[in-house]
Image (tube, coloured by chain):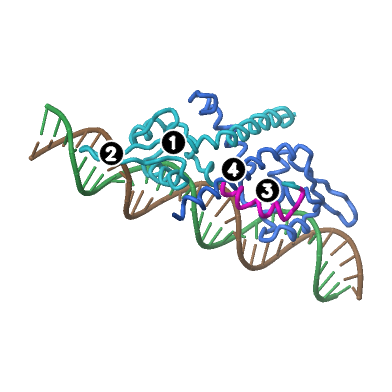
Chain colours: A blue, B cyan, C brown, D green
Amino acid sequence: MLEHSNTHCIAAMPFLRNAMAIINGKWKLPILMALRSGVRRFRDLERSIPGISSKVLAKELKDLEAQQLLKRTVHPGPPVAVDYEALPYAETLDPVIFMLRDWGMQHQQRLDETGPQ
Amino acid sequence: MLEHSNTHCIAAMPFLRNAMAIINGKWKLPILMALRSGVRRFRDLERSIPGISSKVLAKELKDLEAQQLLKRTVHPGPPVAVDYEALPYAETLDPVIFMLRDWGMQHQQRLDETGPQ
DNA sequence: CGCCCCGCTTACCCGCAGGTTAGCAGCCGG
DNA sequence: CCGGCTGCTAACCTGCGGGTAAGCGGGGCG
């Protein structure tokens, strides 16, 4: 698999883990989705993502910024305001996410059909 | 994102998690790779996947079987022999894995280029 | 009989993601 | 001056994925 070579597979694992690490975690995708739908302020994100805690939100935002998927901007007021925006680069994740979602859907169907019997 | 509707995004999350759950875990992909490269017996899998323990291997094999990605067959000997083989269905994961790997590679490059400066 | 191989299972431990609660500095409105 | 909102951080706890070590029933082998 992966070009029919086992060594290539092993070599590919770090990149796979790399990619997974970003999509992974309970909140990364919800955060990106919220950002893309126009929410920018910390508290607004907190409110628009039901269930997330401020601790986790802050941490995930840092991670996503480190991955260059979003930009944090501090507008010195007063009052100071912070906003987060998804970078265009974040869109390059879309095809990957679509693929995962589609396979996930089809797989769920398969399990629903053949599993219960 | 995901068809420009936030509700669709939320609806898609279970499928995403579903798909992730299968690819996820330290050993799922290595096991599938080993199976596809022709290894079928439990002990052989254990040996061809350096670092895995028999406990984890057994558990992951059960999971993968439940997901219908592989088939477990017991050949009553004596001696009894058990073999595991990847089902053709497992190949439907390839495009997903390719996408992840490719994005992961390109992303790694991006971080290497812009990060250090 | 003694020993090793196979295919597991059991019991125990550990690290880390993530949840819970609390608090803090800065600003504002009343 | 009091209370509330914003953008966090700190301290604590829990669950779970996974590692480690050991063992066990069945069989083959010398």
State the image quarter where residue A51 is shown. bottom right
In magenta stretch: residue B14: yes
Which mark is on residue B107?
Answer: none
Q: Earlier in the sequence, mark 4 or mark 3?
A: 3
**Cα distance, mark 3 to mark 1?**
31 Å
Report the span colored magenta: B4-19
Q: Secondary structure at mark 4?
A: helix
**Cα distance, mark 1 to mark 2?**
17 Å
Labels 2 and 4 share a subunit:
no
Labels 4 and 3 share a subunit:
yes
Image position of B80 (left or right of A92): left
Question: Which residue is identified by label 4?
Answer: A103
Which mark is on residue B75?
Answer: 2
Residue B32 in percent (x, y) is at 46, 35
Which chain hosts label 3?
A
**Residue at figure coordinates x 70%, y 32% from the top left:** B111
Labels 3 and 2 share a subunit:
no
Q: Identity of the amino acid at label 4?
A: Trp
Residue B80 in percent (x, y) is at 25, 39
**Residue at figure coordinates x 28%, y 37% from the top left:** B81
Mark 4 or 3, closer to the camera: 4
Q: Is there a contact, CB below 8 Å, between mark 3 and mark 1?
A: no
Q: Identity of the amino acid at label 1?
A: Ala
Label 2 Cα crowd, 10 Å radius (few <14 / some 14-19 / many 20+): few
Which chain hosts label 2?
B
Label 4 Cα crowd, 10 Å radius (few <14 / some 14-19 / many 20+): many
**Residue at figure coordinates x 69%, y 38% from the top left:** A95
Which mark is on residue B86?
Answer: 1
Which mark is on residue A29?
Answer: 3
Residue D21 in percent (x, y) is at 32, 43
